[in-house]
Image: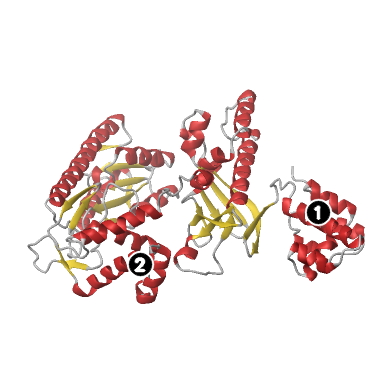
């Protein structure tokens, strides 16, 4: 009887080097690792091992992160079932983090893949191999953390002595011409720019106006408000060095007088007496700061304007505040967006519970309990569960914060399947002068006060005209043009059912005052009712 052929084990080699030094050599560290791993695979040929030709080399990438191009490509091949064994020179070439290692093992086991270290005799297919691996990884992580602490301590000690420890060189300075001096020196031409920025802020006392002036002076540099603000608060310009919250005397020469710097700091404090996101009237906006993005990846920033004694809150695309007018930018009323998002989230969570998908072994009374919790969520509490919102013209994509949801339900965050933490809602938008209107088919619109007021005005004005008042008197009374008054009075002539729908909030969500005032409104009441009356969403 012929012996059964051995099962082939497709082995892939992974190599990594933390620094880029030496990678340009003809035979570098990555090649040496690859050669040793290839020899090991060749020695296991009798066990059915087969060396895959594809190379997975990460040069100049730290082992403290899993965001490595070659490693990502290797794991994608593992997920596709193309790799049975990963071969590394040392275990720390694969990862130095115990947390990352645990996730990696789970991912490999799910696809029936193992890995082996050439210089450390074990593999993950045995319990002893796992124990040895955990011990080695603990030492590797300890070594990495000790090295990081040593570097941090060195930077802190050097900054206390006023040294420049690298990084982006501040505008107005250049690295010292003497390489032995670890400091900066004033760049004479650019230093004048810094002095001008400080002088202009003292004159204007407004960052927005300062940005406009700076854009006019140096359009090619494209300074953002954030960068200008960082220039104004940076103690480097008075000859000091900052390290975290501490400020030390630097070895370099200052550009700005200390007195002027202090005056600017005082002005900045007065202009920002209320920290962003902490204003009591902006509590809801604070829940969504940094969470909403448009189709270009631009973040939407909460802002507000004051008109007629009322504060109107909006979400703006960030490019509208940094680059000026942009027809593709978003400007959405905050109240509408926040109310819709909270309703969408609660509706989705309740629907998910009802489908018994939140947890496979959930009992009926548990489902009912969770639904009651979701129903009772306030708008602010619901918004705090949102991790990210991606805004497009046809879809809102909402990601739920697993930790926040787990805290609410008093369960582990890994209870929820990842695909259940992301959902989409079809929406449409109407761009208007005062902001983009969001329309969600399932959103409970309710009565619209501006429509009700317009209907009330139409009847009031029509009754006054019937009683003998002239249009000129109404013009003087309302301050409106006569054509505006005549157009508004058309609302009083709408079908009684349409008027009741305005009061009940059952008018079709797309219909606006402009639609109802136009000459395109059908004269036949039945046609009006078919065109304008929608159904109250469930």
Residue displayed at 63% across by 23% down: 365
- Tell me, what colour scheme is on the image? secondary structure
Residue 412, position as x, y percentages in the image: 46, 30
Rendered position, 76 above or below 370: below
Of the 4 image quadrants, the one containing the C terminus is top right
Q: Is residue 454 visible?
A: yes
Quadrant in the rendering for residue 203: bottom left
* Disc 2 residue crowd, few under 14, some 14–19, many 20+, Cα 10 Å: few
**Is 538 in front, or is 463?**
463
Compared with residue 361, is residue 511 higher up or lower down, i.e. above or below?
A: below
In this rendering, the label closer to the viewer, 1 or 2? 2
SS at mark 1 in the image = helix
Looking at this view, is 273 or 87 the one in front? 273
Dot 2: element: helix
Q: Is residue 55 left or right of residue 208?
A: left
Instruction: State the residue position of label 1.
Output: 456
Position in image of residue 534 (x %, y %) = 80, 51
Of the numbered discs 1 and 2, the one sitting upstream in the chain is: 2
Residues under labels 1 and 2: Cα distance?
50 Å
State left or right for residue 311 relative to residue 475: left
Query: Could one spot residue 52 in this view of the protein?
Result: no
**353 displayed left or right of 477:** left
Residue found at x 35% / y 56%: 268
Q: Quadrant location of residue 353?
A: top right
Which of these two is toward me, 306 or 503?
A: 306
Q: Quadrant of the N terminus?
A: top left
Q: Position of residue 177 (x, y in %)?
A: 11, 69
Q: Which residue lies at the image location 53% right of the left edge and 60% below the top edge?
A: 295
- Give above or below for 64 relative to 182: above
Please give the residue where the numbered disc 2 appears in the rendered image: 203
């Amino acid at each position: 009887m012929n012996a059964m052929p051995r099962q082939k084990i497709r082995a892939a080699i992974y190599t990594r080097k933390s620094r880029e030094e030496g990678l340009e050599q003809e035979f570098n560290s990555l090649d040496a690792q690859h050669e040793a791993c290839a020899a090991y695979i060749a020695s296991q040929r009798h066990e059915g091992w087969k060396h895959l030709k594809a190379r997975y080399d990460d040069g100049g990438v730290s082992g403290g992160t899993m965001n490595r191009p070659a490693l990502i490509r290797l794991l994608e091949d593992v997920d596709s079932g193309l790799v049975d064994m990963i071969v590394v020179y040392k275990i720390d070439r694969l990862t130095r983090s115990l947390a990352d290692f645990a996730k990696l093992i789970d991912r490999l086991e799910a696809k029936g893949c193992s890995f082996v270290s050439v210089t450390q005799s074990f593999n993950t297919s045995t319990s002893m191999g796992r124990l040895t691996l955990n011990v080695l990884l603990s030492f590797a992580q300890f070594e990495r953390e000790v090295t990081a602490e040593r570097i941090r301590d060195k930077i802190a000690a050097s900054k206390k002595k006023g040294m420049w420890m690298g990084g982006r060189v501040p505008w107005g300075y250049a690295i010292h011409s003497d390489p032995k001096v670890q400091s900066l020196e004033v760049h004479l031409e650019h230093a004048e720019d810094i002095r001008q920025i400080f002088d202009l802020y003292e004159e204007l006392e407004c960052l927005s106006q300062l940005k406009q002036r700076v854009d006019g002076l140096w359009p090619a540099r494209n300074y953002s408000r954030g960068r200008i603000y960082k220039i104004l608060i940076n103690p480097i310009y008075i000859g000091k060095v900052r390290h975290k919250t501490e400020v030390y005397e630097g070895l370099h020469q200052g550009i700005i007088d200390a007195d002027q710097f202090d005056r600017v700091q005082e002005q900045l404090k007065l202009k920002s007496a209320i920290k962003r996101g902490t204003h009591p009237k902006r509590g809801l906006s604070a829940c969504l700061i940094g969470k909403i993005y448009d189709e270009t990846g631009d973040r939407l920033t909460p802002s507000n304007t004051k008109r007629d004694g009322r504060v109107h809150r909006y979400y703006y695309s960030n490019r509208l505040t940094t680059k000026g007018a942009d027809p593709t930018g978003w400007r959405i009323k905050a109240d509408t967006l926040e109310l819709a998002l909270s309703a969408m989230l609660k509706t989705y969570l309740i629907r998910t519970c009802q489908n018994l998908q939140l947890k496979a072994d959930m009992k009926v009374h548990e489902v009912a309990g969770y639904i009651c919790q979701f129903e009772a969520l306030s708008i602010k509490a619901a918004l705090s569960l949102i991790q990210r919102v991606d805004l497009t013209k046809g879809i809102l994509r909402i990601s739920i914060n697993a930790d926040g949801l787990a805290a609410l339900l008093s369960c582990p965050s890994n209870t929820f399947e990842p695909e259940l933490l992301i959902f989409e809602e079809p929406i449409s938008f109407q761009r208007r002068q005062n902001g983009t209107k969001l329309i969600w088919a399932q959103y409970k619109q309710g009565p619209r006060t501006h429509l009700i007021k317009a209907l009330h005005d139409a009847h009031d004005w029509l009754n006054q005209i019937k009683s003998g008042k002239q249009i000129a008197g109404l013009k003087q009374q309302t301050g409106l043009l006569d054509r505006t008054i005549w157009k508004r009075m058309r609302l009083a002539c709408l079908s009684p059912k349409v008027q009741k729908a305005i009061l009940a909030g059952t008018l079709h969500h797309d219909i606006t005052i402009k639609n109802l005032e136009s000459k395109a409104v059908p004269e036949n009441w039945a046609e009006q009712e078919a065109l304008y009356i929608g159904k109250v969403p469930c």
